[in-house]
Amino acid sequence: MRFLHSSPTPHHGLTSHLAFLFALVVSAFSPFQSEAQTERGEFTDPAPPEVHEVPAGAESPEPQSFDRLTFHGAPKPLAADAVTADWPRFLGPNDDGTTPETRLLNTFPETGPALVWEMEKGDSYTAPVIQGAHLVYFHRLDGAETVECLHPETGKRYWSYSYPTDYRDRYGFNSGPRASAVLADGRVYTLGVTSILTCLDLKTGMAIWQRDLQSEFGVPQYFFGHGSCPLVYQGKVIVNMGSPDNLSVAAFDAMNGKMLWGTRHEWRSSYASPVVKPLQGKDRLLVFAGGESDPTFGGLMCIDPETGELFDAYPWRAERRESVNASSPVVVDGDRVFVSECYQKGGVLLELSKDLKWREVWKAPDFGMHWMTPVAHDGYLYGFRGYKTFDAWLAGYRLEDGNEQWREEFEWNLTVNGRDFGMSFLRGSLLWADDRFYAQGESGSFAILDLTPEGASIKVNSQLFLAPSTWSLPVVCRGLLYIVQHESSPVDGTPPRVLCYDLRAAAP
């Protein structure tokens, strides 16, 4: 028996057509001005939010234990010479699945690193984010999208904030948020599955402002609701909107939520999170758009993050209607960017020219990511590709020419409660930290891999739990590892959880 789980791939249905018809109707009542006016920086904000000031000197309450938290044991002290970094966004401090953290374990038992604490969670496909002594997790509990702020080492809770939602996933997946929270400048930003954009104070949990982008801009729910993480850049909260009147991307003032600029394009909101990286000497906003549309369209947009000006848009999306772009762009080799999708086209490496236009460098039809963002390292690109669990494998590609160096389908046997399972990483995730690759399998495995241009091997492998849909990237912060079990285990019945492990190496 191989432990498999189907991917979140949409299926044709009446609700898809209803959503599209709704989009057409909403477009006739657009609150925005013409495309030419938008290019000149003019716009109309339909509903600037009310802003609430946080009282001067307000501090975090003392963290408290609560009924969904189980504490197992304190972690080892952090080594004095350990390099650490916050993890304020879903792809980490560098927005690419890497962290400068050091003094991490290079081996651990088959049962995995020591468990520090665990929290039973609600519906979501999100990961925790961490800044200083605050960990924030965004999920759905008892019919409400909920933001909880915890102490990273104990799991004790500082505060909780929630608002009701009636969203139901049309394909039977869980109905929680898809986009992880973002931490910046002492604030928490969340984008809910129904396009509720919220700004909270990190210390107190007080709501500063909130916008309902669905009602204000007519943003449809598309296949799985709004799932692209917002991006906070130099005082702006940037959102891949995809409204039916071609407001593809919008920026809001991080302090008061007012709209600052909008980028007009027909491409809809994807499930890939935007990033800002230096290209051709200046910061550029990269948005890999492309969600539900008929006819299909989407691809990589290069935008001025200060003004919203669109420099170029390179089409890259499957022709199949029920497909999405979900893997974030990876900047490699200066002015080059890799993007991929798993439904049809695979991967492509693009180069931004001096006149700010995309040029295709090479294609890799077999290197298509479903949701994971591949990791670039020493001139090579490594990632778990795969549309379904049965066609997933780990591969290494040379960035210079796009040649596949190798592919590997790791398989092993596991016995749990007298039942035998044939295991694999399936559509796993990769994390680069402390000069090594850590891998998380789709069914709850965690390993250290040796990945080189010559091949791949497992150095150590553990099974933390046995449950499907382990889809969000692991988080490492101050030597602690956070992994999210998104579904209940069909083997031992453990519920969905956020788990904290001690990944700290002993002090030398």
Image (tube, rainbow, N blue to C red):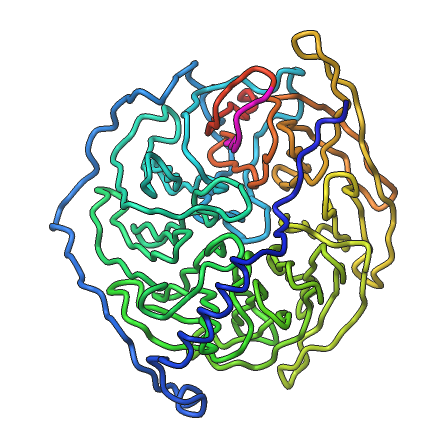
Quarter of the figure that contains the C terminus:
top right
Q: Is residue 291 above or below residue 119?
A: below
Residue at image position (18%, 61%) is 51
487 is within the stretch colored magenta: yes
Left or right, 49 with reference to 241:
left
Residue 82: percent from left, percent from top: 51, 33
Q: Nearer the viewer, residue 127 or 468?
A: 468
Q: What is the total number of numbered labels drawn onto the structure image?
A: 0
178 is within the stretch colored magenta: no
Left or right, 50 with reference to 148:
left
Q: Which of 47 and 396 is in front in this view?
A: 47
Residue 284: percent from left, percent from top: 53, 72
The range drawn in magenta is 482-490
Residue 288: quadrant of the picture: bottom right
Residue at image position (46%, 29%) is 498
Residue 230: percent from left, percent from top: 43, 58
